[in-house]
Structure formats: C-alpha cells, structure tokens
Image (spheres, helix red, strand yellow):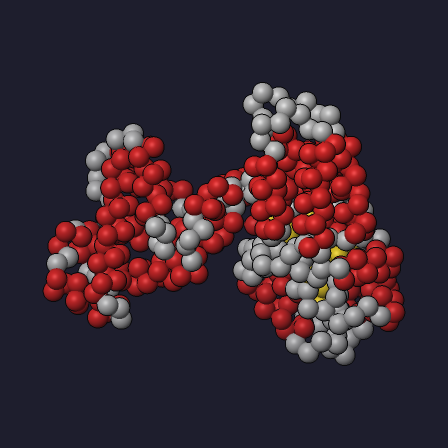
C-alpha cells in the first residue's frame, strides 16, 4: 500500500544527506514530494493539507542528532504525523472494541454494497472467538440482496460462530430484535448485525439502518469501507457519519495493489478510529489496526510485530521445539522436516504476505523475485516430497537417477524440478548445520539463495 510514497521518501532521504539541520528550503523540497505522493494515492485534499501543515510545523528547525541524517529525522516526523492522522493521537484504547455493557455486546456493521461487509462479519466473528474468547452470534438484516443471508451463514460456520437464521420476507428491525432476544437467552457475549448495503447512498437505506440502530442500541457501530475506494471515500464516509453515531471504521482490501488513500482520508473525515483492517481474503485475514505500525509499513520500515504475530498464530510451537532439539543434539535435517517448514510458511500467509511486512531494504533485496511464481514452486516442492517413500524422505542420499525419474512421474513434473528441489533442500540442510554451529551471520547470508524464486 502507498508504495509510491515509500519510494519518494527514500529518494528524498538520499538527496538530503550531509546537511546539518532541517531548514525551510530542504523541508519544502521533501514536503512537495510527500504532497504529490499523497494526492496520487487518492488521499482526500483536506487530509493532505492538514498533514503537510503538521509536518512542516514539527520539522522546521529540528536539530538533527549525530546518529541521524536530516532525511532520517524528517522521516521520523512524517512517521509520527502519519500515525497521528490515522488515529494514534486518539490513544490506544480508542481502537479497541468496547465490551463494557450487559452481554450481549451488539456490533452493528454498516457500509455500501460490495465493500466486503458480510465477509468482514465472518472475519470479525472468528477474531472475537479465537483472540478474545467470546461466544459470538451473527445475523443478517439484508433482505434485499439474493443469497445475502446464506452467504453470512456460510462464513459464520467457517468462523466457528453461531448464526441466527432469518427469511427474506422478514423486516430488518424485527430480525435484529429477534436475534437480540435469542442471544440473551443463549448467553452469547457478542451479537454482530450485518445490515443491507446499496450500490450507492440513498435515503431509504440510511433510514432503515438508523431504525435498526435505534431498536437495538449497539455499543459499537462500525463503518466498513473499501481501501481502494479513493476520493469517493470522502462522500461515503460523510453520509454514514451524518446518519449514524459511528464508533469506528473497518478498512477492507488493504492487501490490494491500489493506492490506498482511504486509510488516511476516512479517519480524517469522520474523526473516528480505524479499528480493523482486512489484509487478505482468508477468514483469518483481519488485523486489529495499529496506526504506528501502519505508518511504519507505509514508510518502508516494515511491520516486524505483525510478522511475529503471524508466526505466533501459524507456527506449531511444539514441532519447532522438537526440530530445534533434534538439530541441537546432532540429528540430521531431512525431507520430512523440510516439508514441515514449507507448511509452516504457508500457514503464515505465504511468501508475498511475509515480504510485505519486512522493511524496505529486505523487500528490495527480493525485488527480482516473482512471489506468485515462488509460491507455486513451494506447492510443487510439496508435491514432489509427497511422491517419495517414507524411507526416501528420511534418507535423501538414497535418491539417485532411477528414484528421481519415479518421483518426477508421480508428481507430474520433470526430473530437473526434482533436482532443483533437492538442491534447495540441501541449502536448507546446510543452513541448519550452521545454526547448530552458531554461525548465524553465515546462515543469514545463505537465506536469499534458499528461498524459491530468489537468486
């Protein structure tokens, strides 16, 4: 997201090397680049003006400490203000969901049709169930869109939450009240209400959502908006903010290759915190929004905390400990271990998801790699290993020409691909030996060659 801004800032940092302090002249040059990048990213003009004014005020005359260049100091100011404009100035508690009420806590989801609202309800149900240990019930008041109720029922089942069934002939307010009554009787902690969307803003839709809101009095009213919406985000955000007492925002499709200006615009327009961001199409692709960490990612500083969280969710800790112990006592890293590592990487969202969270210098090192192609290679490598016998996986040295031909036929690939996979396995095996011997720096240098699609 906002790759253009990242690239422009990197260029400015380079041109400002050697200057002793931030002056009006060199700050103006940098801010011109930032202003252009923000406008090209479809950030709303009022948000751009406020942001530039705040950066200019903070940056002018700031002393550059010995460990920083003026460019780095200026990026520090930009990072702080980016985080502030996305909600860091509201404090950490503002981005948290409010459960300070008699259960069930009601969450009302509002937004236009096509922004991913129903899928987001499923993602939120899964997040609350797994991360907050809540008993969740979902219900759809969308009696207009064909299969809307069935869609929510399907994603709710995938999320492991409970679903309140309704009919398209029911009235939205009646549906919401019936679901609330059911949630109370069955001791649910949270009730999430999915409301109807429209292709455009219309008075009837707003009145209907307002009526549902008045009837159930939700503790959270979340506005769901597509991060790729661009300048249209301004009008949509204003309309919903005027019609409903919003408590927060959910950005969807933040993983898209769009310019992403809605992330900066919507918070400025509504004054409400961004609480969640949809970062993939999968049901676990919903993250609690952190303005400082998002600012780091926009500026190419990466999001190592998110990477650690992905690892915590995706990695089998017991299996990792067993592998570490095996290597420590001199055990040999075999193809079963290699396949397990490929599986762990897939659980963490694949190579492209991991690369997106790394700092810019690491992403640049991998810039020649085609991540889609690399992930295809990972799947093919798994297929090749699956075509081996258990004995071959444990003792890869047995795999000679005739075995390679049999494995290639079983996996539906050429023998050259089997050779390539074995070569990458040997690199990984070699890296594990270095880890055993404490050669961490050598291991880090070898990692680039180990990753599929990277040279």
Which image quarter: residue 115?
Answer: bottom right
Q: Position of residue 206 (x, y in %)?
A: 85, 66
Q: Position of residue 404 (x, y in %)?
A: 17, 63
Residue 263 makes an appearance in the image = no
Residue 413 makes an appearance in the image = yes
At a point 59% along the width and 65% down the height, the residue shown is 155
Observer-nearest of 337 and 370: 370
Using the image, determine if residue 255 lies above or below residue 90.
below
At a point 11% along the width and 64% down the height, the residue shown is 402
Q: Is residue 91 left or right of residue 216?
A: left
Observer-nearest of 15 and 302: 15
Q: Residue furthest top?
A: 66
At a point 51% along the width and 43% down the height, the residue shown is 360
Q: Position of residue 124 (x, y in %)?
A: 63, 55
Number of dots carrying numbers: 0
Q: Is residue 399 left or right of residue 201?
A: left
At a point 68% along the width and 54% down the height, the residue shown is 41
Using the image, determine if residue 132 lies above or below residue 411.
above
Q: Is residue 380 left or right of residue 263?
A: left
Observer-nearest of 237 and 190: 237
Q: Position of residue 376 (x, y in %)?
A: 38, 62
Which image quarter: residue 125?
Answer: bottom right
Which image quarter: residue 416?
Answer: bottom left
């Amino acid at each position: 997201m906002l790759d253009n801004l990242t690239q422009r800032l990197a260029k400015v940092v380079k041109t400002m090397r050697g200057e002793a302090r931030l002056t009006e002249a060199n700050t103006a040059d940098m801010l011109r680049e930032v202003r252009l990048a923000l406008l090209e990213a479809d950030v709303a003009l009022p948000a751009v003006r406020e942001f530039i004014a705040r950066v200019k005020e903070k940056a002018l005359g700031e002393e550059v400490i010995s460990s920083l260049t003026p460019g780095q100091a200026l990026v520090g100011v930009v990072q702080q203000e980016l985080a502030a404009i996305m909600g860091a100035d509201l404090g950490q508690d503002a981005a948290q969901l409010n459960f300070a009420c008699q259960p069930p806590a009601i969450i009302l989801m509002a937004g236009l049709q096509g922004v991913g609202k129903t899928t987001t309800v499923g993602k939120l149900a899964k997040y609350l169930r797994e991360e907050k240990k809540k008993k969740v019930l979902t219900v759809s008041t969308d009696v207009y869109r064909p299969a809307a109720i069935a869609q929510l029922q399907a994603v709710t089942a995938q999320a492991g939450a409970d679903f309140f069934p309704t009919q398209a002939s029911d009235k939205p307010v009646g549906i919401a009240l019936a679901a609330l009554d059911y949630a109370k009787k069955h001791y649910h902690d949270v009730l999430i209400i999915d409301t109807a969307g429209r292709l455009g803003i219309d008075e009837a839709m707003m009145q209907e959502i307002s009526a549902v809101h008045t009837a159930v009095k939700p503790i959270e009213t979340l506005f769901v908006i597509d991060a790729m919406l661009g300048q249209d985000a301004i009008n949509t955000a204003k309309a919903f903010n005027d019609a409903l007492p919003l408590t927060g925002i959910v950005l969807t499709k933040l993983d898209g290759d769009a310019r992403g200006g809605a992330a900066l615009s919507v918070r400025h327009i509504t004054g409400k915190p961004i609480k969640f961001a949809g970062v993939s199409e999968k049901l676990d692709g919903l993250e609690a929004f952190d303005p400082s960490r998002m600012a780091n990612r926009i500026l190419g500083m990466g999001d190592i905390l998110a990477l650690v969280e992905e690892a915590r969710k995706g990695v089998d800790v017991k299996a990792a400990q067993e592998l570490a112990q095996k290597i420590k006592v001199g055990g040999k890293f075999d193809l079963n271990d290699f396949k397990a590592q490929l599986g762990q990487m897939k659980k963490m969202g694949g190579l492209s998801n991991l690369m997106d969270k790394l700092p810019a210098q690491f992403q640049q090192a991998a810039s020649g790699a085609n991540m889609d192609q690399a992930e295809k290679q990972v799947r093919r490598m798994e297929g090749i290993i699956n075509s081996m016998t258990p004995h071959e996986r444990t003792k890869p040295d047995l795999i000679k020409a005739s075995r390679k031909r049999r494995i290639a036929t079983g996996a539906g690939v050429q023998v050259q691909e089997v050779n390539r996979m074995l070569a990458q396995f040997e690199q990984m095996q070699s890296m594990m030996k270095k880890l055993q011997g404490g050669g961490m720096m050598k291991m880090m240098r070898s990692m680039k060659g180990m990753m599929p699609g990277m040279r």
